[in-house]
Image (spheres, rainbow, N blue to C red):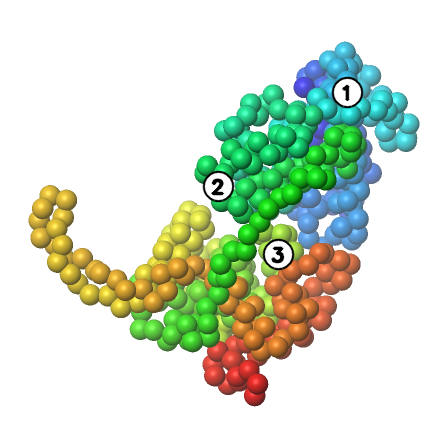
Amino acid sequence: MASVTYYLDKRSRKKDGTYPLKLTVSHKQKPFHVPLDVSVPEANWIDNRIEGDVPNRSFLNSYIRARFSAVENLLLRLKLNGKLDKTSPEELKSLVKNIDAGQDDETEKTSGENLPFAAHARSFIDTRVADGTKETYRYTLDAIGRHHDLEALTFGDIDYDWLEEFDMKLRATCGVNTRSIHLRNIRAIYKDANKKKLVSKDLYPFDDFTIRTEETEHRDLSVEELRRLRDYPVEPHQEQYRDLFMLHFYLIGINTVDILHAASIRNGRLQYRRAKTGRLYNIKIQPEALEIINRYSPGKKYLLNFLDGYKNYKDFRSRFNRNLKEIGPWEWVSAKSKNGRGIKIKQRSPLLPFLSSYYARHTWATLASELDIPEKTIQMALGHGKKSVTDRYVNFNMKKVDEANRKVIDYVLKKKKPGN
């Protein structure tokens, strides 16, 4: 099977310290290189993307991805038409050069009915930025594999009847919103194949198929519940978890993975790229947040020391959420061990037995709404909405977000109430 990968040619260092970026196409164990006419420093080439302070970074990433996709699509078309195995490496190299010259001879129209779904899905997943997003799509492939022969499944197989049958089979183990996630993931993969002209739009099965969802329970605390949690005399081992939850809140509901991997504070602000979306955030550190940060910094590797002693953040996150659920009064009660011996155990009466780190983000948004902070400012603070040109300028209108966060924190401190 032919393949295409990125290749940073470290053999050819330029005078400015950059290296040429190329595509490596491998066919029948004979690779050849395709120059992209782009050079980048080694430190800025991360996970097949140009990162950091590189001029025209967004344009360059779009350009190299388009070149990569053009070659990838050529390979898929050749395979779909049964011509790939008959094409020699030299002939393939010529075809790739014709793409660069705008003379792609392999322009046979195809419906894509026999295009393997799983192969294209995995290629699509590899282009996602966030690990969590990749995992969600893999979860969908696993779900399909439990009910169908995943490797034999083609885009032509996925029609309206297939979707209805798949949705019905999922009902035995999945709720409405979980089924919605799987179906929306399939739709996204299908749209990607349409966009790349690998599958005809005539085959698209979602025009008449409705993906159902249901409203989920709100995951927010009232201001009274938040104050009670903040002021509760927790057990010594619970203090760090309660403090971290409050830090989440003071930083506008920052995600656990992002605060645990934060590197430093610059000019009184925390700047980071959100792991889930890749979006850039810039939050002013309010005094309440700084007090907690000073208590738990520096860490051995990151700004905070919560991950010191942990191999990965997921282990800590599990313990974090488990301890949040246990905060509250408790007493020693008599019980029996498995072998029948009398023992004493802690019987807990948690304040908020449902609590998790996600509540910080939802609570901040709810309290901001109670204070009549404009919806657009709340969306900006949470990073909602589509990316636009203005997102490139991280300080764009951040003063409004800073003021909104201060109002929300003052409300929790009882310095301001709605209507005053």
Give whichever of 19, 245 is nearer the camera: 245
- Mark 3 to mark 2: distance in Å? 32 Å
Residue drawn at (58%, 52%), measured in percent from left and top? 275
Q: Are marks 3 and 1 in contact (CB under 8 Å)?
A: no
Q: Secondary structure at mark 3?
A: strand
Distance (Cα) linking label 3 and label 1: 39 Å
Of residues 257 and 217, the one drawn nearer to the viewer in this rendering: 217
Residue depth check, mark 3 versus mark 2: number of the one nearer the observer: 2
Of badges 3 and 1, the one in the foreground is 1
Dot 2 crowding, Cα within 10 Å, few <14, some 14–19, many 20+ = some
Q: Which mark is residue 273?
A: 3
Q: Residue at x 63, y 68 (%)?
A: 378
Q: Quadrant of residue 89?
A: top right
User: How many marks can you see?
Assistant: 3
* Secondary element at tag 2: loop
Element type at mark 1: helix
Q: Which residue is mark 2?
A: 174
* For marks 3 and 1 on the same chain, the one whose residue lies earlier in the sequence: 1
Residue identifier under label 1: 78
